[in-house]
Image: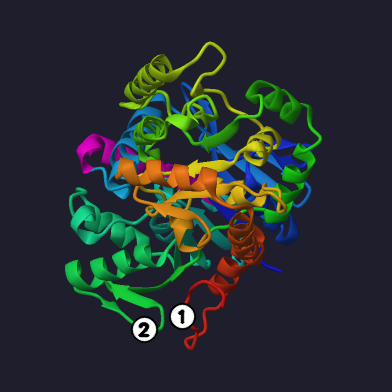
């Protein structure tokens, strides 16, 4: 039986034979334990002289193979090209992208070093699954070392339209590296269309109706595989929240007021400043809501060393002070803004207690918070999801109130609608979304992608979401 080899930028640490991380890590670990295999990636440590060989930790049938990174590589590969160049470009923020030849060279050098560290661990019948934008060249580097195993790649972020992607220096080299994989998975049909348009319009290749895409003298299969959550686990955490001490403490502070909740990494792609402005606009337009509703925004720091993130934090702190100073009463603060990280069980309490889940990124590959919010709700008295049309989740969660996050008045109106929505409509919307989440959970996502990667027959059907 073939082993599964997972490659990701970070490897989740193991606590009692489970990864200490979210639903994706848990699903990946479950697939690894079923098939046996290796999880390879950065261990999160910065070392003066990182050893070239990975550290191996055995957990049953799973080997965790991790490497450290030098300060230079962390600055130039991780904070540099991956997060100061690729991340903003992939999220349509060319105004924030920094382009540096030195950083690109580090991006290629680190991927080559990762490939050299991983290659000796591989077996001839392994199946390799590489994750996300940090690791696009890894497949090409492994092929150069002689690796001919089946290799799949999944992009968790959006893939922008060619007009945006063309602004990325060395875009052709990066796309050429992508075409060394056998299968490329994307979050939405829009992302797939962007890849096909780049191939046909820019690179002069062929994008067939059977899911095969050919350019640079290479052919791969590309398909839509929208990532899910561990729906059953989040439903259980939500039900358990009704009896938790955390929920009792939260209820005591709300004193019967409605709660709007947002949970996001501290990142410019999440639209947090616009979200605060929309909440302020709602309080302006709906004076009767003053003193009756609270926005709880959780935004743990993300990549605090990267440029621009300190500015976002200061702007949000300023906005919080402005809105609270304008509308607060002696016994009520409109916005509770927390830079802390919470456990998943605690987040489930916040989701369960809230009347509205506010998920309004300016651009997002999928956004699993939207899905977790829905799964954590009480089916008898569910909250309402207000969701950006630019999150991949909007393609699946049809029961959400979908908004344009750039339109402050529209988002403010959606909050008013959500707070006043009748119970029957809330139940209908929630049931529709929950059924979708149960049909396509994260475990099914893993199975679907790996099944498509294993299907290498010439007559393979087009890759895409299951019917």
Residue 309, placed above or below residue 212: above
Residue found 77% across the figure and 38% down from its top: 242
Total residue callouts: 2
> What is the quadrant of the C terminus in the image?
bottom right
Counting from the top left corner in percent of width and height, residue 234 is at 69, 48
The image quadrant that residue 317 belongs to is: top left
What is the number of the mark on residue 462? 1
What is the number of the mark on residue 3? none
Which residue does the numbered mark 2 point to in the structure image?
Answer: 209
Residue 234, placed above or below residue 342: below
Q: Could you tell whether 126 is left or right of 15 in the image?
A: left
Counting from the top left corner in percent of width and height, residue 21 is at 64, 39
The image quadrant that residue 275 belongs to is: top left
> Does the rendering let one see residue 126?
no
Residue found 78% across the figure and 27% down from its top: 245
> What is the quadrant of the N terminus in the image?
bottom right
Task: Write down the region rendered in magenta.
Answer: 94-118
- State the separation of the CA atoms marked 2 and 1: 7 Å
Q: Considering depth in this image, is 394 or 411 the residue closer to the camera?
A: 411
- Disc 2 to disc 1: CB gap under 8 Å: yes
Of the two numbered discs 2 and 1 on the same chain, state the one appearing first in sequence. 2
Residue found 34% across the figure and 47% down from its top: 410
Q: Could you tell whether 24 is left or right of 226 in the image?
A: right
Counting from the top left corner in percent of width and height, residue 358 is at 49, 42
Q: Main secondary structure of the magenta part?
A: helix
Judging from the image, what secondary structure is the residue with disc 2 in?
A: loop
Residue at the front extreme of this rendering:
288
Counting from the top left corner in percent of width and height, residue 463 is at 48, 75
């Amino acid at each position: 039986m073939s082993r599964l080899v997972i490659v990701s930028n970070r490897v989740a640490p193991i606590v009692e034979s489970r990864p200490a991380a979210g639903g994706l890590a848990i699903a990946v670990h479950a697939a690894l334990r079923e098939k046996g295999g290796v999880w390879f990636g950065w261990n999160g440590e910065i070392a003066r002289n990182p050893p070239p060989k990975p550290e191996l930790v055995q957990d049953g049938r799973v080997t965790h193979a991790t490497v450290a990174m030098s300060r230079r590589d962390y600055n130039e590969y991780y904070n540099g090209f991956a997060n100061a160049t690729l991340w903003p470009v992939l999220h349509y923020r060319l105004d924030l992208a920094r382009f540096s030849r030195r950083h690109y060279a580090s991006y290629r050098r680190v991927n080559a070093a990762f490939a050299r560290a991983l290659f000796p661990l591989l077996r001839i019948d392994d199946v390799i699954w590489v994750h996300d934008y940090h690791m696009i060249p890894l497949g090409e580097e492994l092929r150069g070392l002689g690796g001919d195993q089946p290799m799949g790649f999944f992009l968790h972020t959006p893939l922008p339209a060619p007009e945006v992607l063309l602004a990325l220096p060395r875009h052709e080299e990066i796309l050429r590296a992508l075409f060394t994989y056998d299968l490329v998975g994307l979050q939405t049909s829009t992302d797939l269309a962007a890849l096909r348009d780049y191939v046909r319009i820019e690179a002069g290749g062929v994008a067939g109706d059977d899911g095969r895409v050919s350019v640079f003298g290479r052919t791969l299969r590309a398909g839509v595989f929208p990532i899910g959550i561990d729906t059953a686990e989040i439903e259980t955490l939500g039900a358990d929240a009704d009896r938790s001490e955390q929920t009792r403490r939260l209820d005591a502070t709300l004193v019967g007021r409605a709660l709007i909740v947002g949970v996001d990494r501290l990142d410019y792609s999440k639209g947090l400043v616009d979200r605060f402005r929309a909440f302020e606009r709602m309080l302006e337009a709906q004076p009767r809501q003053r003193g009756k509703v609270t926005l709880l925004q959780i935004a743990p720091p993300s990549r605090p060393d990267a440029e621009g993130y300190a500015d976002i934090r200061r702007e949000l702190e300023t906005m919080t002070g402005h809105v609270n100073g304008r509308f607060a009463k002696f016994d009520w603060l409109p916005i509770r803004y927390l830079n802390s990280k919470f456990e998943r069980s605690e987040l489930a309490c916040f989701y369960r207690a809230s009347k509205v889940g506010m998920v309004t990124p300016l651009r997002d590959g999928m956004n699993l918070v939207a899905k977790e919010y829905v799964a954590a709700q009480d089916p008898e008295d569910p909250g309402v999801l207000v969701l950006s049309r630019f999150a991949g989740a909007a393609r699946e969660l049809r029961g959400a109130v979908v908004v344009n996050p750039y339109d402050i008045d529209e988002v403010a109106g959606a909050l008013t609608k959500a707070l006043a929505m009748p119970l029957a409509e809330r139940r209908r919307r929630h049931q529709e979304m929950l059924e979708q989440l149960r049909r396509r959970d994260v475990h099914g996502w893993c199975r679907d992608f790996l099944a498509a990667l294993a299907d290498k027959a010439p007559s393979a059907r087009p890759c895409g979401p299951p019917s």
